[in-house]
Amino acid sequence: MSSSVSARSLRKQFGETRALDDVSFDVEAGELFGFIGPDGGGKTTLFRILVTLMTPDSGQAHVLGLDVVRDLWALRRRVGYMPGRFSLYPDLSVDENLRFFASVFGTTPEREHEHIAPIYDQIAPFRERRAAALSGGMKQKLALCCALVHRPEILFLDEPTTGIDAVSRRELWDLLGRLREQGMTVVVSTPYMDEANRCDRVALIQSGRVIALDTPAAVAASLGHPLFAVRASARHAALNALRSFPHVHSVLPFGDVHHVTDVRRDVPVDVIAGELRRYLADAGFADAEVAPTAPTVEDVFIERMGSPYE
């Protein structure tokens, strides 16, 4: 399988801030690839380089076989880009925005209707409404239509679900899945760890460095410490108690439980679970439930960042 994106040793610095630090990766053709990481991790800088809006300080990147610096004009017609912030014209209607972006690439919404129909049909009832008056989810769908109207070969979406409701998040990811099924390469970034499972492969990125890259299942399975789910009625008090457990590596609030990792890799998990139960009972949490649990991508991200409780 050929690579749609290939990056080697990318670096970018703004003053004293190192936005990208020796970033290398490949995205295969037809893949839904996700960059997962917090704000300030380097995702937006990386995307701007890949879509030719910024040049790296060093390193190389190729998209669709074209160099992002030397071949920028040839590349721009072949990529679709949806930036993190809503960047369409707020005073123009839905149709006016779409028609404008189509005209930039010498086409029309009518000519490309079949291509954008699965997304456009959802916003068509609001086609006369100004973009500024759309809901967050509808704004993102309009932006996605504008990014797709010229039939790009690869699509880059920088945090497309930030700030929209849970239903719109799910709908947008469903749309991305359909695009991938149609053979389009989709590269997306998100700060939401739970969205990693919607990708074929993910790269965890923090402080400008890729700290893990694999399928979501393989990344989750790479957790280096035994993991336990702890449930107690006094959740906040239990959190503080767990952070004082002698062998704790990290404690992460996780829904209605706490995910706790232990620094010991050579002790059976049932032994550690028993120790945790006794420790919590002695600390006044007699109702605490402790059980080994399967790790998630978020658990791995926390571990790779390093825990302040280690």
Image (cartoon, grey):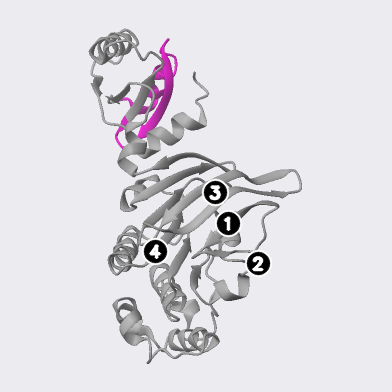
Query: Pointer 4: what residue?
Result: 185
Quadrant where the N terminus sits is bottom left
Task: Tell me where the magenta segment starts and ends, as one range.
Answer: 234-257
Query: How much space separates mark 1 and mark 4, taking CA atoms?
Result: 16 Å
Residue 261: where, in percent of width, then height? 37, 22
Residue 120 can be seen in this image = no
| Of callouts 1 and 4, the N-terminal one | 1
Could you tell me the amino acid type at mark 2?
Arg
**Would residue 222 appear left or right of 80 to someone viewing this image?**
left
Pointer 2 or 3: first along the chain: 3
Which residue is the site of mark 3? 39
CA separation in Å, label 3 and label 4: 24 Å
> Which callout, 3 or 4, points at the residue further toward the start of the chain?
3
| Amino acid under disc 3 | Asp
Disc 1 target residue: 61
Kindly identify the residue that appears in the image at 58 percent across and 56 percent down: 61
Where is residue 210 drawn, in percent x and y? 52, 41
Residue bearing the label numbered 2: 70
Asked whether the beta carbons under mark 1 and mark 2 sit within 8 Å of each other, the answer is no
Crowdedness near tag 4: few (<14), some (14–19) or many (≥20) residues, C-alpha within 10 Å: many
Q: Quadrant of residue 224?
A: top left
